[in-house]
Amino acid sequence: MLLHRESVCPAEGLSLLDTLDENSHKHAFSVSEDLKYALREAIELLGNEAVYYLQEKLHEKVYGRDLARQLTVECLRYMYRLLFLLYIEARPELGYVPMKAAAYRTGYSLETLRELELVKLTTDESRNGFYLQESLQLLFGMIYDGAPPSANGPDQQLALDGNPEHHVFRIAPLRSHLFDPKRTPLLNRVRFRNSVLQRVIELMSLSRPKHNRERRGRISYAQLGINQLGAVYEALLSYQGFLAETDLYEVKKADDGFSRGE
């Protein structure tokens, strides 16, 4: 029992509560380390997809350090948006996003999209469609402009008798640089395929397997503290992408195992 004397104040050694707290911090640290690598791979996925779309769909020339620098910043901002949303949705006590509202939770939340992380995309339409991007763009807009949009006035959801309507929710507008669409002009012109964004969501949702056959655990953002998220944020500040001028090959040591997808 957690409240038993032996659990709270044992005669010898650490208490059970202290042991559980220590293990929780160790787990959170391990998760934050996984996230550092996952976010880097996700940024590369977004950047490569943006280059593909600009070249193959918009028929634009993609070259230069300035473009690579701008694309890096925008991909970082995109990933920070996802990280922020995963954190605040996992902590409903903060009261920012209405996770208790079924309409938001099942129709708009990022948590709902996480349920699609391992769904097999078996057709060209499912792989190359844009459902995930359209859903995320809608969610980003709701965070930035609020829901309902603040321009429509604070009382638009009130019925004639003054009582709130059923099945509605409110989100206060967050007019920050993070969600400002003007801060991602390049990515605003790009359409990310479902296959790419599904992989990005998977990387942010599941831990990395330490061994080839190890089962991957689901990352709980509710267990991550500000310190762990800050460590992830700082680890990406030095990240700098570039546009390869020649074919590049990734190599590994002879005694290292193969990672997922190899």
Image: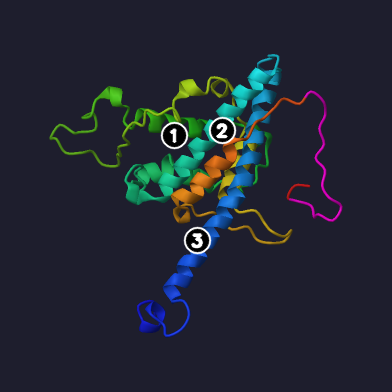
Nearest the viewer among 198 and 252 is 252
Residue mark closest to the camera, 1 vs 2:
2
Q: Position of residue 160 (x, y in %)?
A: 15, 31
Q: Position of residue 188 (x, y in %)?
A: 54, 22
Residue 184 vertical position relative to residue 157 in the rendered view, above or below: above
Who comes first in sequence, dot 1 or dot 3?
A: 3
Is residue 126 shown to the viewer in this render? no
Gap in angstroms between the C-alphas marked 3 and 2: 26 Å
Q: Which residues are magenta?
A: 245-259
- Residue at 70 percent across and 14 percent down: it is 61
Q: Disc 3 on helix, strand or loop?
A: helix
- Residue at 39 percent across and 50 percent down: it is 91
Who comes first in sequence, dot 1 or dot 2?
A: 2
Query: What residue type is disc 3 on?
Result: His
Query: What residue type is disc 1 on?
Result: Leu
Residue 67 vertical position relative to residue 110 in the rendered view, above or below: above
Q: Residue furthest left?
A: 161
Q: Position of residue 203 (x, y in %)?
A: 61, 46
Q: Which residue is mark 1?
A: 139
Q: Which residue is mark 3?
A: 25
Q: Which residue is mark 2?
A: 76
Indicate left or right for 97 with 67 as reference.
left
Is residue 114 shown to the viewer in this render? yes
- Residue at 46 percent across and 41 percent down: it is 84
